[in-house]
Amino acid sequence: MHNEEFGSQCLVRDCTNNRFRDTSACQVHQAEWRKFKKYQTRQTRSGIRRMLQRPGETQPWNPQRRGPNPQHHDDDNEEPPLPPNYFSPARFYCVETICAPCGVVIAWTKFARSESTTNILRFLESVYTTEDSRPDYICIDKACQVF
């Protein structure tokens, strides 16, 4: 039903025009569609993956300063901004898991915006609802810092 009603519409937010030919955007938003397609090639994505897999390298765009930096991944959870278009599915910031000492996964959840303390505490409270069910200690690995 959803596909029949909206399947031919442009995927740019708040646009009700029909798609142009075999693209996901209308005639008005073709520039945005071309830009999206330019950066979605297999070759482009594999180059980005290579850069991310070598974090120890010093690149001009990496900060040269060492020391305490604000941990943006640790910011309080805010409502995510609406995407400008729906050309690709939404992404999550991270997947958090609770594991037993033997490595068995007890529970997992997705965090949309941040790995904040508030999010972690809510997750723990949802899994361990009573004080009797809680473990004696919990280790949390956040950005290579174990708490």
Image: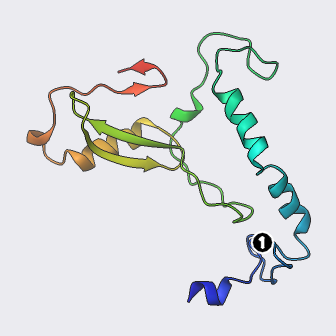
**Residue 39 horizontal/vertical position (percent):** 80, 49
> Farthest front residue?
43
**Which quarter of the figure is the N terminus placed in?**
bottom right
Q: Residue at x 67, y 84 (%)?
A: 6
Disc 1 on helix, strand or loop?
loop
Which quarter of the picture shows residue 89?
A: bottom right
Asked if residue 146 lies left or right of residue 78, the reply is left
Residue 71 location, quadrant = top right
> x%, y% of residue 104?
24, 37
Q: Is residue 136 left or right of residue 26?
A: left
Within 10 Å of disc 1 (Cα), the crowding (few <14, some 14-19, many 20+) is many
- Relative to 89, does residue 45 appear above or below in the rendering? above
- Residue type, mark 1 in image: Ser
Relative to 50, 72 lies left or right: left
- The location of residue 131, given as percent across then percent down, is 12, 40
Residue under the image location 72 percent in, 64 percent down: 87
Check disc 1 and report the residue beneath it: 24
Q: Residue at x 21, y 27 (%)?
A: 101
In the image, 93: left or right of 124? right
Is 25 rendered above or below residue 3? above
Residue 67 point in image, percent of width and height: 61, 10
- In this rendered view, identify the residue nearer to me: 14 or 45: 45
Residue reaching furthest to the top: 66
Residue at screen point 41% across, 35% down = 117
Out of 110 and 132, give the one closest to the viewer. Answer: 110
Residue farthest to the left?
132
